[in-house]
Amino acid sequence: MVDTSDEWIRQRTGISERRIAEDDVATSDLCIHAARWAIKNAHIDPLDIEMILVATVTPDRFFPSTACYVQKGIGAKNAAAMDISAACAGFLYGLDLADGLIRSGRYNTILVVGGEIFNKIVDWNDRNTCVLFGDGAGAAVVQATDESKGILASYIGSDGDYADVDLLDQKLDKIQMNGREVFKLGVRLMPEAAQRVLRQANVSVEDIDLLIPHQANLRIIEAVGDRLGMPREKVYINVDKYGNTSAATVIIALDEAIREGRAKPGDLLLLVTFGAGLTWGSTLLRL
């Protein structure tokens, strides 16, 4: 469809495979599937969930929210539900919000989901974007715990001056991106965000057991790890299998890292991401 090759894609992005949802699958379908697994692993009843936060820029509809469809799909009748539109930073925005709501004492159990079906907004004639994105979802149940584990520090930020660097063209209904500018911003902002939560928690890079960065492309991931001084073996990478799943990348990677044994109980994990807006965020947590 475009002037490219498998070799070019692998060399420039590190992506070997992607998952593309079928035409009759909605973002909420992926989110419901991920949410059910998270609920099962957390050993809770869906009726215990008090808030559902779905991070997505590819909602089923403009309204009602995708989160409402998720609430219906998992039977979480007692939960309030809303979407978060922060592009690739959306899941960490959701974690930050959930952390604050639980620390306030008003909520005990919050479901945070990141889900996207990007193939519906990709211009398949644009080589700069059509080789990058995949579809997927991940979810986490957030609850109060003792201070020695869970979310230790969290930070989110934005800068609207860069709103046009990565956007959805309203006329074409397709994503447009300035790849060179996105690369420069990503390799600057993610290390800065990461350092900020390290300072908040008074820990050093050497204390981190695993860095889980936004899976935008391999070059950005490696550059972020290098700037932070993280050894390659402590940087989690799965962009080769899924491409950039936007708001879902970090939670999919976290889930896989745990299931593969790369992230173990007691480990200190650093999650960091950035996305359109411009938005960015970082979360420091102990399993």
Image (cartoon, helix red, strand yellow):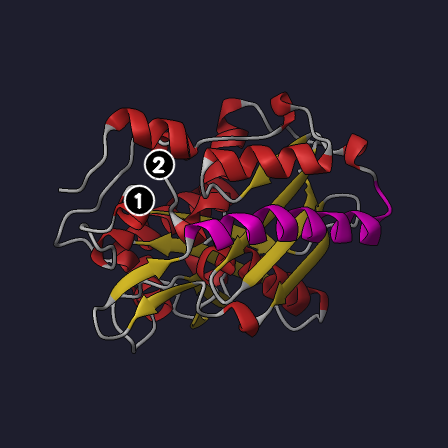
Q: Residue 45, image x and y in percent?
A: 45, 54
Prevailing SS of the magenta stretch = helix
Instruction: Identify the element where label 1 is drawn.
Output: loop
Residue 82 vertical placement versus 230 (above, below): below
**First along the sequence among labels 1 and 2:** 1
Residue at image location 60% in from the left, 46% down from the top: 187
The numbered dot on residue 65 is none
Decide if residue 40 is on the left or right side of residue 72.
right
Q: Residue 215, image x and y in percent?
A: 47, 41
The amino acid pointed to by label 1 is: Gly
Which stretch appears magenta? 179-203
Decide if residue 195 is on the left or right side of residue 223.
right
The image quadrant of residue 83 is: bottom left
Decide if residue 268 is on the left or right side of residue 180.
right
The amino acid pointed to by label 2 is: Tyr
Q: Can residue 108 be seen in this view?
A: no
Question: Dot 1 surroundings within 10 Å: few (below 14), some, or many (20 or more)?
Answer: many
Residue 207 vertical placement versus 1 (above, below): above
Residue at image location 70% in from the left, 30% down from the top: 230
Instruction: Identify the element where label 2 is drawn.
Output: helix
Would you name the residue on which mark 1 appears?
A: 134
Question: Dot 2 surroundings within 10 Å: few (below 14), some, or many (20 or more)?
Answer: many
Would you name the residue on which mark 2 appears?
A: 242
Residue 65 vertical placement versus 192 (above, below): below
Q: Distance between the residues labelled 1 and 2?
A: 6 Å
- The residue nearer to you, when weighing 287 against 56, is 56
Q: Look at the image and say whether residue 196 sits in the magenta stretch.
A: yes
Are the residues flagged by discs 1 and 2 in contact, CB closer than 8 Å? yes
Residue at image location 69% in from the left, 44% down from the top: 285
Q: Look at the image and say whether residue 286 sits in the magenta stretch.
A: no
Q: Residue 269, image x and y in percent?
A: 67, 38
